[in-house]
Image: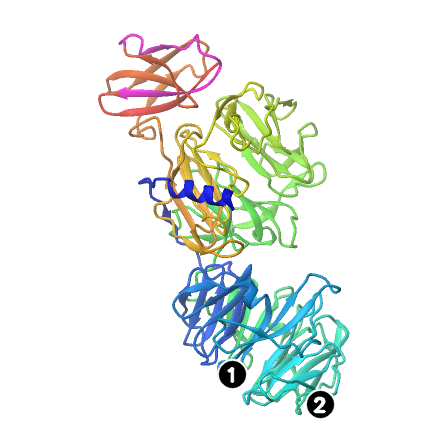
């Protein structure tokens, strides 16, 4: 607790700088929602990665209720408008704000229900296995402020991978499914329960039972996992009658309302409008492997389905066999796997790879098997690469066919290029892909890849590689060890780590960084090395970093950036350091914040996924958004480098640099190390045109040039 308090105090003391993030517009495709629910008034409630939304017009339009609501399922929408959500804890929206509920009081409900007088019921499971699970029926008469256990109920069916069931009829009779597979009924609002007497004969782990509240009929799927029968009970489960004439194959879910019954699964969809007497197979409405995840039949008879392919919510017209997208107003993308080549941004938006050439004004979605991906890379020539994850795991690297934006799988001489741990290019237009299954691959044409057998890799841990333009060197980080290659990945040299334990290595300009976290000891801090043997440092930061902070990045203008990944702790944010990790300031102006729920939640933070520094820009992927900002340049007051022709030659050099800028008068030149330390200064008119760096240690430096019109910075290399 003292450590968390210390971190909180140090973060609060950080000053906010003036740099501003700009939020990009995201497209309307490639999305999914977490859950869909109809409330007592016929309104639809949708849970997305961007919060809870509501529709009062049958999903034609959606409005945001609460941005901070996060979870995977809606437990209940109550008569007074509260919304209960489960995920990493239980969150309740009370009509104006959301708040995480106390586990000691609410428990961890698997299902909730409400009677007409506002009394709440929940089934709560404690324990993680069949042998230590305890199940409680809880009730609340004060809108969920307090809950009490019904100690007389002990036989609720809840086991590993088996859902609890809780139903409330319009007359307030309450039902749950017992461990003997009987329906148990209460006519006194949950005080006492009686078994209805007829077990439901199912063998699969999913109970598949539904209540038609308008017609007071129960429906249940009976039988094996592949071939099932549909049974119906009109007497609250006392007796059951088989109603289908032929077996229902591939069905594992059932939903019913006002005599409309839909039975569906991962490869079947059957519909009945007469209470299950006759069924019509509607499976042809959907592509193979793209059946609805959930179906909702509303009180008005409309049918909505969720997560069909990339369509989050669709209305199904089962009479005319049509689908219509119903996502207007929803904000729900999760942005990951971002890449930026200076003009084109690519990203995985809820799993589907997209790219934009105008900073989010317009987006294009890539197509084909490789388009459902977990990572992207934009090459110098603009082509997008993806790491496909369509099968639920990595299944290959694909390249964009720019003719039709389809994705084509790359080829390899040995095994396959399985995924993208790192992808980069050298100064000879070769492209490299590091995979955590088969290692490093290299290609001269971007399509046919050759395995590099000597490259260090580990098929379990995270790895990264990159090419340093100035040094013409490839650096690699593998399982907490550092390597480099000076012959384009043919041979490798292993670095010598510092004596103090390193928490993280990360990419630098002209070398590699590492951060050693040894508490209050003097060796804690940031270190830098070009040869991975001699390390400069430490620069001890002014705040405490631990494992909840993501890997730092160094922008190409020299500034270090680091993002806090877990907003459930002290609030996700972004920091920057202009002095090589010594002092850190907040870099969050323009970023949206949310309340972080979960363990020790309740703090404000940025729902952050990843940060990228590339081509003078910072790109931040968050839950729901992509932000972009200009990098800060700590060594120049203005950066006109992109529009002013500055000639520095030869570069690299071992002694003299010739410097020329057209139509400007050079007044002074300063040379800085990558740590920001001034190592040379020139003001003599002759000296500033012929910069002598012969006595500097070989490595990469930054040149700060002052003229009568401004200041400029350029990277140089001393051989």
Magenta segment: 684-706
* The image quarter in which residue 62 lies: bottom left
Q: Where is 100 relative to 432, above or below?
A: below
- Asked if one can make out residue 525 in the rendered structure from this viewpoint, the answer is yes
Is the residue marked by circle 1 packed among few (<14), some (14-19), or many (20+) residues within 10 Å? few
Q: Say which element carries label 1.
A: loop
Res. 301 mark:
1
Q: Residue at x 72, y 40 (%)?
A: 415
Q: Nearer the viewer, mark 1 or mark 2?
A: 2
Q: As rendered, which of 316 and 31 lies closer to the eye? A: 31
How far apart, in angstroms, are the residues tagged by discs 1 and 2?
28 Å
Q: Where is 461 relative to 514, above or below?
A: below
Res. 238 mark:
2
Q: Position of residue 128 (x, y in %)?
A: 69, 61
Question: Is residue 597 part of the magenta span, yes or no?
Answer: no
Is the residue marked by circle 2 packed among few (<14), some (14-19), or many (20+) residues within 10 Å? some
Question: Is residue 690 part of the magenta span, yes or no?
Answer: yes
Q: Say which element carries label 2.
A: loop
Q: Which residue is drawn at 67% across and 70% down?
A: 135
Of all residues shown, which one is farthest toward the bottom?
235
* Label located before the other in sequence (1 or 2): 2
Q: Where is residue 354 in the image (x, y as percent from the top left)?
A: 49, 51
Q: Where is 714 relative to 148, above or below?
A: above
């Amino acid at each position: 607790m003292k450590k968390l308090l210390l971190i909180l105090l140090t973060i609060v003391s950080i000053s906010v700088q003036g740099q501003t993030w700009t939020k990009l517009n995201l497209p309307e495709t490639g999305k999914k929602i977490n859950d869909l629910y109809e409330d007592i008034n016929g309104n639809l409630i949708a849970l997305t990665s961007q919060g809870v939304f509501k529709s009062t017009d049958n999903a034609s339009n959606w409005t945001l209720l609460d941005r901070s609501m996060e979870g995977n399922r809606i437990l209940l929408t109550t008569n007074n408008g509260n919304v209960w959500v489960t995920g990493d804890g239980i969150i309740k929206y009370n009509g104006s704000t959301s708040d995480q509920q106390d586990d000691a009081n609410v428990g961890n409900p698997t299902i909730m229900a409400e009677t007409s007088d506002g009394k709440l019921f929940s089934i709560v499971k404690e324990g993680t296995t069949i042998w230590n699970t305890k199940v409680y029926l809880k009730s609340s008469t004060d809108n969920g402020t307090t809950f009490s256990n019904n100690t007389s109920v002990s036989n609720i069916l809840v086991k590993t991978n088996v859902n609890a069931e809780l139903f409330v009829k319009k007359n307030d009779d309450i039902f749950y499914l017992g461990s003997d597979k009987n329906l148990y009924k209460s006519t006194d609002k949950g005080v006492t329960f009686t078994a209805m007497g007829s077990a439901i004969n199912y063998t699969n782990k999913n109970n598949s039972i539904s209540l038609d509240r308008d017609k007071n009929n129960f429906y249940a799927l009976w039988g094996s996992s592949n071939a099932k029968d549909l049974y119906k009970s009109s007497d609250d489960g006392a007796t059951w009658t088989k109603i289908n004439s032929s077996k229902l194959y591939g069905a594992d879910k059932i939903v019913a309302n006002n005599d409309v019954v839909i039975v569906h699964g991962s490869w079947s969809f059957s519909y009945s409008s007469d209470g299950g007497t006759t069924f019509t197979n509607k499976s042809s409405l959907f592509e193979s492997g793209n059946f609805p995840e959930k179906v909702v039949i509303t009180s008005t008879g409309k049918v909505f389905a969720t997560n069909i392919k990339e369509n989050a919510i669709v209305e199904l017209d089962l009479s005319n066999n049509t689908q219509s997208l119903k996502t207007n107003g929803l904000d729900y993308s999760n942005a990951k796997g971002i890449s930026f080549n200076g003009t084109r941004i690519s990203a995985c938006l809820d799993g589907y790879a997209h790219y934009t050439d105008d900073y989010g004004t317009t987006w294009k979605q890539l197509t084909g098997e490789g388009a459902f991906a977990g990572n992207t890379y934009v090459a110098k020539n603009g082509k997008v690469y993806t790491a496909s994850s369509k099968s639920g795991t990595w299944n290959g690297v694909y390249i964009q066919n720019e003719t039709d934006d389809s994705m084509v799988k790359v080829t390899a001489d040995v095994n396959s290029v399985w995924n993208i741990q790192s992808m980069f290019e050298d100064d000879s237009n070769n492209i490299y892909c590091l995979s955590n299954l088969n290692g490093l691959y290299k290609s001269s044409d971007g399509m046919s890849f050759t395995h590099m057998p000597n490259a260090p890799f580990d098929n379990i841990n995270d790895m990264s590689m990159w090419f340093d333009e100035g040094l013409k060197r490839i650096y690699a980080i593998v399982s907490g060890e550092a390597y480099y290659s000076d012959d384009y990945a043919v041979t490798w040299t292993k670095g010598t780590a510092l004596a103090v334990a390193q928490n993280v290595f990360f990419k630098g300009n002209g070398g590699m960084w590492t951060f050693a976290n040894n508490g209050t000891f003097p060796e804690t801090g940031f270190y830098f090395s070009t040869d991975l043997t001699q390390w400069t440092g430490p620069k001890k930061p002014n705040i405490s970093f631990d494992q909840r902070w993501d890997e730092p990045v160094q922008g190409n203008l020299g500034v270090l950036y680091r993002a806090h990944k877990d907003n459930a702790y002290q609030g996700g944010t972004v920091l920057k350091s202009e002095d090589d990790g010594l002092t850190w300031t907040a870099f969050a102006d323009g970023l949206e914040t949310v309340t972080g729920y979960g363990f020790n939640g309740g703090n404000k933070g940025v729902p952050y996924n990843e940060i990228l520094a590339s081509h003078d820009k910072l790109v931040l992927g968050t839950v729901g958004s992509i932000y972009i900002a200009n990098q800060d340049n700590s060594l120049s007051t203005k950066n006109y480098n992109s529009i002013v022709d500055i000639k520095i030659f030869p570069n690299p050099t071992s002694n003299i640099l010739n410097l020329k800028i057209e139509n400007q008068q050079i007044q002074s030149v300063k040379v800085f190390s990558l740590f920001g330390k001034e190592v040379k200064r020139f003001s003599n008119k002759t000296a500033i045109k012929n910069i002598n760096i012969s006595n500097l240690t070989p490595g990469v430096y930054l040149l700060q040039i002052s003229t009568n019109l401004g200041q400029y910075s350029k990277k140089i290399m001393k051989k």
